Image (cartoon, helix red, strand yellow):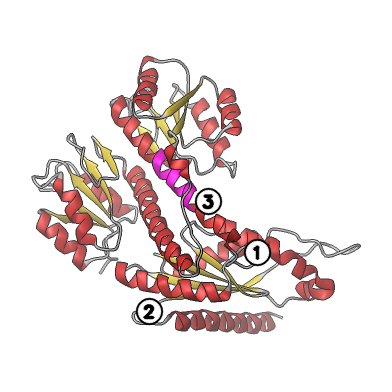
Amino acid sequence: MGPDPRVLIVAETDDRLGALCRGLDAVGWRTLTARSGAAAEAALNDFVLEAAILDTAHPDYPALAERLRQAAGDRRLSIIAIGEATAAPGVDLAMSEPPHPAQAALRLEQLVRAAIAEEEFRLRQATFALRGASLDLTDDEARPLKVLVAGGVDSRFLALSNALSDGGAEVVAAPTPYTAFDYLHETAFDAAVLWGSPDHAPALSIASGMKRNTRLYHIPLTLYLRHPGEINLAELFNRGFADVASAETPEAEIAARVLALADAHRRHVNVRRALEAARGSGLMDPSTGLFTPELFAAHLARLAEGARNRRRPLSVCVLRVAETDVLAHARVGGWLDRAMPQIGAMVSRLVRVEDTAARLAPEVFALALPATAGPAARLAAERIAAVVGCTAFDAGPERSPFVVEFDIGSAEVAPGESPASVLERASADLATRRAQAIVAARSAG
């Protein structure tokens, strides 16, 4: 038996979405097709579905989108509509033609992560409110979305710029990659559209440069193809493009897709900014800006309740500074203590916006990762430890800098399990793995 389905497809026939379903199944987004609105609502009760794709030719469309949102309950369902008549309340993304499976998988990942971040923000607001602190989004959403359009003068590219402006965006045009990077470094953009020249070299150059820059990395990129069938779409998505519009796609639809990306990015940035602003609330660990043990315990209880209500997984990881000879020397003179604020700040930057990071003890950190199963949570913790392990810290005069290693434990919340219990299991997993590593090292020696 295969994994549970992740995407609900609502279509009377497979004519429009059948190939997309097969493509999504192949890349790990297993689909489940419902032929009627009633069957779709029942599927949401029977399975923990993360998103829905609607065929706009379905007789229940467009009211179906709102019905599915209600059927999903506390879990925010991301919805994509595909077909000619796409306007509907509750739809996150509308497309006239089925996208490439790699493109659909990328957009689904973005939409689902945004939904989870929104859920986490609301939970964190409640946690902070009970302690007399407010957690509010900025007024940044009142500003027009700012979109960079980069490429040479062309009638269709100009038409797209006009469509973006008609949609309320502030459009900045850059005719060359050099001017594009000048603008990107001077101001903040919510999205960028790159015009595909015959060899795509300028667009790919801009995309590669942005993906190497930590400040520009998350800005969603759309490539507008100049000619049909001219490049491998899967390769483009691997290069970091969030969307690729074919030459036949109407400018109005491309503009709507770009604005949806820009709006999601603006929201994501504002949520992270609001969560980071919580460091000044007086509730956080003063040296690292992370959750204190007490605040983490209270929020973990809220997270566990939310995970049960939304039927999403929730995992906890514990990272403890390892007992090594190098770190034993670093503790002498307090050099490790001096490095801990920087290490804590790195941990806070390396987690996703929806994850909660805490400092449980002077050399112990904890992570709560919503909508994340146990194995994936451990991989996330290992990646964080690997990045921190690449940083050298000062060990004092005439001594070589030192690096920090972590012992890691993880556990996924079991049905009915208390937050305290899952934290204890993660700590026990850490101790077990540490003991196994010691035994393995002695055997190898």
Q: Position of residue 290 (x, y in %)?
A: 59, 65
Which residue type carries mark 2?
Ala
Q: Read off the residue under disc 2.
A: 414
Mark 1 residue crowding within 10 angstroms, few (<14) / some (14–19) / many (20+): many
Helix, strand or loop for disc 2: loop
Q: Read off the residue under disc 3.
A: 273
Residue beneath the point at 31% across and 67% down: 310
162 to 296, vertically: above or below: above
Q: Read off the residue under disc 1.
A: 288
Q: Position of residue 137 (x, y in %)?
A: 46, 50
Q: Does the magenta segment cover residue 424?
A: no
Q: Which residues, given as a range, are shown in magenta?
A: 262-271
Main secondary structure found in the magenta portion: helix
Q: Position of residue 249 (x, y in %)?
A: 29, 28
432 to 28, vertically: above or below: below
Q: Position of residue 328 (x, y in %)?
A: 78, 76
Helix, strand or loop for disc 3: helix
57 to 125, vertically: above or below: above
Which residue type carries mark 1?
Thr
Residue beneath the point at 90% across and 62% down: 397
User: Residue 393's image quarter?
Assistant: bottom right
Helix, strand or loop for disc 1: loop
Q: Would residue 102 appear left or right of 73 to someone viewing this image?
A: right
Precedes in sequence: disc 3 or disc 1: 3
Precedes in sequence: disc 2 or disc 1: 1
